[in-house]
Image: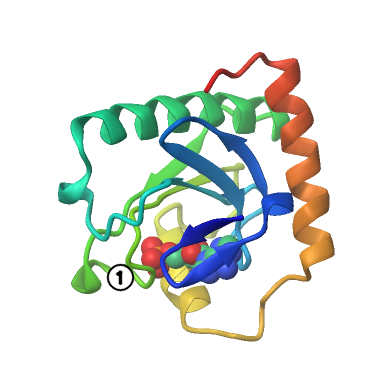
Amino acid sequence: MLKFGQHVIQQSCVFWESKLSFAFVNIKPVLPGHVLVSPKRIVPSFTNLSPEENVDLFKGAQQLASLLKTHYKTESLTLVVQDGVDAGQSVHHVHIHLMPRQAGDFANNDDIYGEIERVDSTTSEIRSEMEMESEAMIYKELVKEMGITS
Ligand code: AMP
């Protein structure tokens, strides 16, 4: 069990861990494969990451980006860090959004940013724990198969 800001993330929803970072499935994904990578320590802002946390987080995000590209058979991925309230950050614990993209997934490519904001403000699209666990299990297997290191 790990903390994500004020939220508790069940171990069953975590699919990758290193010494300083972890990755978990999203409770309200804007697209299939929308996952989050965070430092284990509750760090509110990107500028508060230690150099070690920064390296560990982005190394993990890069490897997991490859995993998502392979699994979702795409060469395209949107990475987002909303840093601060005025940038749209709703959980005050640094996280990188990784979102695999497909041709035509939005009418206009950049509509994804509006969708992130829209989904953030709804409570109606929360997924069941069972659905999230099943997704995390698939990625856990891939982490092993692809030899993704911590
Ligand atoms: P942001 O608006 O950039 O702070 O993004 C917060 C992200 O955290 C959104 O994608 C939410 O769907 C996601 N989120 C919030 N609570 C949880 C949770 N308990 N488990 C997984 N993802 C969450």
The percent coordinates of residue 15 (x first, y second) are: 66, 40
* Number of numbered callouts drawn: 1
The image shows residue 69, relative to residue 25, as above or below, that is above
Pointer 1 residue Cβ closer than 8 Å to ligand 1: yes
Percent x, y of residue 145: 75, 17
Query: Most extreme residue toward the top, as rendered?
Result: 147
Question: To which residue does mark 1 refer?
Answer: 88
The quarter of the image holding the N terminus is: bottom right
Check disc 1 and give the amino acid type: Gly
Label 1 sits on a secondary structure element that is loop
Please determine whether, in this image, residue 141 is positioned above or below residue 80: above
- Residue displayed at 70% across by 35% down: 72
15 is higher (above) or lower (below) than 43: above
- Callout 1 environment at 10 Å: few (<14), some (14 to 19), or many (20+)? some
Q: Quadrant of residue 130?
A: bottom right
The colour scheme is rainbow
Residue in the picture at 68% in, 16% down: 146
Left or right of 11, for residue 60 = left
Horizontal side of 5 relative to 140 (left or right) equals left
Which of the 4 quarters of the picture holds residue 100? Answer: top right
Residue 25 rendering spot, x and y as whole percentages: 63, 52
Whether 11 is drawn above or below 119: the answer is above
In the image: residue 42, left or right of residue 17: left
Q: In percent of the image, x 26 and y 29: which residue is there?
A: 52
Q: Position of residue 9 (x, y in %)?
A: 60, 60
